[in-house]
Image (spheres, grey):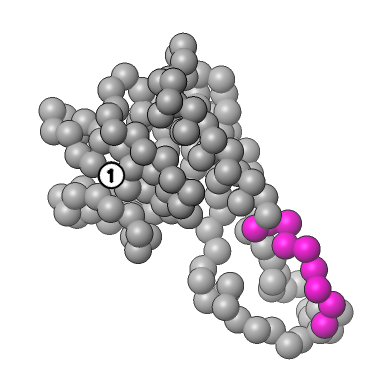
Amino acid sequence: MSRKIDYGNLMHRAMRGLIQEVLNDVSVRGLPGDHHFFITFDTMHPDVEIADWLSDRYPDEMTVVMQHWFDNLDVTNDGFSVTLNFGEDPEPLYIPYDAIRTFVDPSVEFGLRFETQTREDDDTDDDTDPDDADPGTKENKAPAAQVVSLDSFRKS
């Protein structure tokens, strides 16, 4: 079987690197101008660290906003930690880049969406020849990287 370039995963790695670079800049210099972020992430990711009450309230995914007040932003190669206010209660969060589903900066109409791929799909060895596969099946497709439409975040 011939080796193929995994463009989907390469694109996701580049997109996560972009998020890391942006957050690192914000941790050093603060948010410039009207910039702010909506970050949606998978709360079931094994490396996500959030308070139990947040996990109970958001069992699948959660969207956080980094705008007027946030504290203790620490950016690493694998993810970032930040303290955000929920009501009047500050809560520390740790979000690995792999858990991020969308990253949006509506001030400049910029957004990224990560299509999910199950770990079972990553670990399977498929010995079938792609030329023999039924053209109607979509096996071995890499996750698609997409730019997010900001209309999905606007209230009607």
- Magenta residues span 1-9
Q: In which quarter of the image is residue 30?
A: top left
Q: In which quarter of the image is residue 136?
A: bottom right
Residue 97 visible to an observer of this rendering: no
Circle 1 is placed at which residue position? 93
Mark 1 is surrounded, within 10 Å at the Cα level, by few (under 14), some (14 to 19) or many (20 or more) other residues, namely some
User: Residue 156, image x and y in percent?
Assistant: 42, 24
Is residue 87 rendered to the left or right of residue 105?
Answer: left
Residue 59 visible to an observer of this rendering: yes
Query: Which residue is depicted at the point 55% across and 46% down?
Result: 16
Residue 121 against residue 144 in the figure, above or below: below
Amino acid type at circle 1 is Leu
Look at the image and say whether residue 3 sits in the magenta stretch.
yes
Residue 101 against residue 122 in the figure, above or below: above
What is the secondary structure assignment of the residue under circle 1? strand
The residue lying toward the viewer, choosing from 31 and 61, is 31
The residue lying toward the viewer, choosing from 114 and 68, is 68
Quadrant of the image containing the N terminus: bottom right
Query: Which residue is depicted at the point 51% across and 68% down?
Result: 118
